[in-house]
Amino acid sequence: MDIYQHFRSEERPFIDQVMEWKADVSMQYTWKRTDFLDPREQEIVDALVGRNDDVSVSFWGGSEHAERKRACLIPPYLELAEEDYGLTLFELSYPKKFLTIDHRQVLGACMSLGVKREKFGDILVADERIQLVVATEIAEFVRLHLTSVGKAQVEMVELGFEQMLVTTESWHERTATVSSLRLDAVIGEMLSLSRAKAAELVEKGRVKVNWKLVESGALTLQAGDHISVRGFGRHKLLEVEGKTKKDKFRLRIGRMGH
C-alpha cells in the first residue's frame, strides 16, 4: 500500500520521519518522545502509527484543549505518566497596569531566544494573564533568558498544569459555493475578497494552511484544512458537500470566534 497517497506531497518528509520513529520503537524496544507537533502533524502521526500491536502513540500538551502537543510512541508493555511528556508551564509576571502583551509578541520573544519553534507549545492568553508551555529540556534556559516581551519586563513563574488556563475554540459555520478548490478562490469566498486580492495575501506571506506558510494560491484545498490569514483570523474548510447544478463546489466553512 502506498502510504503517501492519502497525504500531500509536501508532507512526505514528515511522513518518512514518522515511519522512522515507528520502526525505531518497534525494533529497539525503546520509546520516542517528539517535539511539539501542530494539529495536522498529530493527525499524520495518529494515522501512521495508530494503535497497532507493536507501537502505540499518545499526545499531551498540558490539557485536553491544547493545540500543540508532544507525542510519545511506545511499545505495548510501557505505560507513561504525564511527566514523561516533558512539559513545563510558565505564567508571565509583568506590570499589567501599565502594559499589554499579546500572543504575537510572546511568540516573537520566544523565537528571539534562538530556540526552534518545535520546543514551544501553546501560548495562552485570557484577560491579562499569559501562560506558555515549553519543553522541559529548555525550561531553565527560557526562565533565565526570557526576561522581556515587547516593552515589558517579564518574570517566568512556573506553575502546575492544574493551573493551566483553559481556552476553547468555537467555530461560526456557514455554507458557500466556489468555482474551484484553489486556495485563492476559497480565501476570496471566506473573506469576501476578489481572487486577485486573495492571491496577493498568499504572495505576501500572510497565509498558512495547516500551520505551514503557503506561497501559491493554486494549492488545492481539502476538507479538514485549516487556513489562517494574518489580519483576518483563522478559518477551516469543514466539508466539501458536493457540486451545484452550475458545477460549483458547495462548501461548509468555519471561522474561529470567541
Image: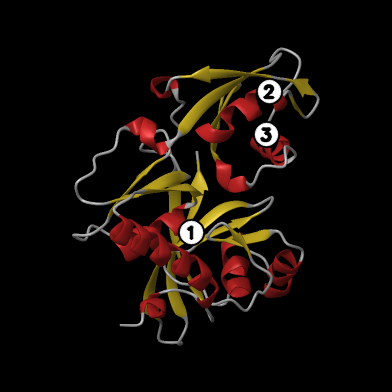
Instruction: Tell me: 111 left or right of 187.
Output: right
Report the front residue among 71 and 225: 71
- Asked which quadrant contains residue 110, the reply is top right
* Quadrant of the drawing holding the N terminus: bottom left
Query: Sequence-wise, which precedes: disc 3 or disc 1?
Result: 3
Q: Secondary structure at mark 3?
A: helix
- What is the distance, in whole Å, between disc 1 and disc 2 at their CAs? 38 Å
Report the residue at 49% width, 52% height from top: 38
Q: Secondary structure at mark 2?
A: helix
Q: Residues within 10 Å of mark 3 (few under 14, many from 20)?
A: many
What percent of the width, then of the height, locates residue 116? 64, 46
Label 1 belongs to which residue? 236
Instruction: Tell me: 39 left or right of 53.
Output: right
- Asked which quadrant contains residue 245, the reply is bottom left
Query: Sequence-wise, which precedes: disc 1 or disc 2?
Result: 2
Which of the numbered marks, if any, corresponds to residue 144?
A: 2
- What is the distance, in whole Å, between disc 3 and disc 1 at their CAs? 25 Å
Instruction: Tell me: 16 left or right of 139.
Output: left
Q: Is residue 108 above or below residue 3?
A: above
Query: Sequence-wise, which precedes: disc 2 or disc 3?
Result: 3
Residue type at tag 2: Leu
Report the residue at 70% width, 67% height from top: 202
In the image, farthest residue toward the right: 151
What percent of the width, then of the height, locates residue 47? 33, 64
What percent of the width, then of the height, locates residue 108? 72, 40
